[in-house]
Image (tube, rainbow, N blue to C red):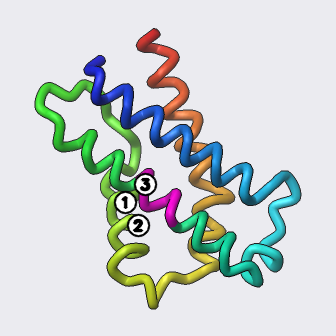
Amino acid sequence: MLLEEKKYLFDIIESINSIEEYIGLDKNFDAYKKDKKLRRAVERELEIIGEAINRLNKLDGRTIEITDSRRIINLRNQVIHGYDSVDDTIIWGIISKYIPLLKTDITNIINNEQ
């Protein structure tokens, strides 16, 4: 695995861990929806995840395939460029359902390379 690939993978894991820390164990959508700082922090971490995956995809000689990478990059673009149309319900669904799956995928990739 390329050194740059490792860096981006660890950036993704760090952002996922941050989202989990921000949301907490109770995962309360109403609390999320009411807290502007929390929403913005989560959106920023999703931007970082999308950008890291985008950079991974552009590396020459890359060896990593991430499930739904195009959708993740599209989400990043939506959050950055369509910030005024970000739907809290959709973001909540992503962090509740897909972030744990992505964490498993990335963790498996990292563990298989060590």
For label 2, the residue is 75
Which residue occupies 63% across, 73% down? 39
For label 3, the residue is 48
* Type of amino acid at the residue the image marks with label 1: Arg
Which secondary structure, mark 1?
helix
Residue 48 among magenta residues: yes
Residue 58 in percent (x, y) is at 17, 43
Residue 14 in percent (x, y) is at 55, 40
**Other residues around mark 3 within 10 Å, as few (<14) / some (14–19) / many (≥20):** many
Residue 7 in percent (x, y) is at 38, 31
Disc marking residue 71: 1
Q: Earlier in the sequence, mark 3 or mark 2?
A: 3
Residue 34 in percent (x, y) is at 76, 83
Per the model, the C-alpha gap separating discs 3 and 1 is 14 Å
| 1 and 2 marks in contact (CB < 8 Å) | yes
* Type of amino acid at the residue the image marks with label 3: Ile
